[in-house]
């Protein structure tokens, strides 16, 4: 598998920008609400901790067969960052697989930003050499389940660390319906 690198992705209202260390200060504010950790655990990072984490993420996976792709979500109309999307791409028996995740800061939730960003990411991944897209979602996290559904993923009977595995085969459909 050749490495896939994050490229800027534009949707109707959003720019998904490849992650840079310089995003850490603004993103620490975006991700500062402890409620964002209700389903995934942990506590909000300080700007310094987030900067260090971003440096590690940008350096890439130590495994050459794994690509880490990370974006910040910029709401164009308000010229501010509102969250992140990410994809970890690796080979598996059915071909390249992308595991995706998203988070939107509390002040921007309920505005369709996560849905639009996830759709943009899935659409972009569908044009890459990826066969399968998955996400792991806590069974009580209804908002993330709605985002996954809107991005064309469906829940499976598989569980991973207390979360339901959601799945989409890219070969089933190369476009997202309902855009």
Image (tube, rainbow, N blue to C red):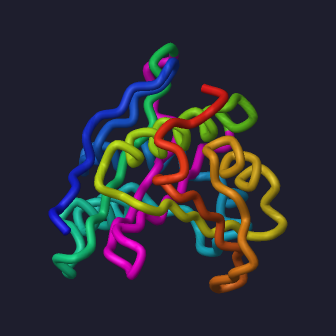
Q: Position of residue 146 (x, y in %)?
A: 76, 47
Please count the marks in the image: 0
Say which quarter of the image contains residue 155. Answer: bottom right
Q: Quadrant of the N terminus?
A: bottom left
Tell me if 78 is positioned left or right of 159 in this view: left
| Looking at the image, residue 41 lies above or below residue 132 | below
Task: Report the residue at 39% width, 48% height from top.
Answer: 125
* Nearer to the camera, 122 or 171: 171
Residue at 41% from the left image edge and 59% from the top image edge: 87
Residue 35 is a magenta residue = no
| Residue occupying image coordinates x 66% and y 28% | 178
Helix, strand or loop for the magenta stretch, by majority:
strand
Residue at image coords 70%, 29%? 111
Farthest front residue in view? 172
Q: Which residues are magenta?
A: 78-106
Image position, residue 11 (x, y; %): 46, 24
View extreme (bottom): residue: 161
Report x, y in % for residue 78.
51, 17
Q: Compare residues 90 and 27 and report the one nearer the observer.
A: 90
In which quadrant of the rendered view does residue 67 lie? bottom left
Asked which quadrant contains residue 165, the reply is bottom right
Q: Position of residue 30 (x, y in %)?
A: 53, 43
Q: Nearer the viewer, residue 140 or 135?
A: 135
The answer to whether 78 is drawn above or below residue 163 in the figure is above
């Amino acid at each position: 598998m050749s490495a896939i690198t994050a490229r800027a992705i534009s949707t109707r209202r959003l720019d998904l920008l490849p992650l840079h260390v310089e995003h850490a200060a603004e993103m620490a504010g975006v991700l500062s609400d402890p409620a964002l950790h209700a389903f995934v655990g942990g506590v909000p990072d300080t700007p310094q901790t987030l900067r260090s984490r971003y440096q590690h993420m940008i350096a890439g996976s130590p495994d050459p067969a794994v690509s880490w792709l990370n974006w910040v979500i910029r709401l164009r109309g308000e010229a501010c960052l509102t969250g992140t999307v990410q994809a970890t791409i690796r080979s598996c028996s059915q071909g390249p697989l992308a595991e995706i995740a998203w988070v939107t800061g509390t002040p921007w939730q309920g505005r369709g930003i996560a849905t639009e960003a996830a759709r943009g990411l899935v659409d972009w991944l569908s044009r890459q050499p990826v066969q399968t897209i998955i996400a792991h979602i806590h069974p009580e996290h209804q908002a993330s389940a709605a985002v996954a559904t809107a991005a064309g993923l469906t829940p499976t009977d598989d569980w991973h660390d207390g979360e339901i595995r959601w799945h989409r085969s890219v070969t089933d459909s190369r476009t997202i319906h309902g855009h």
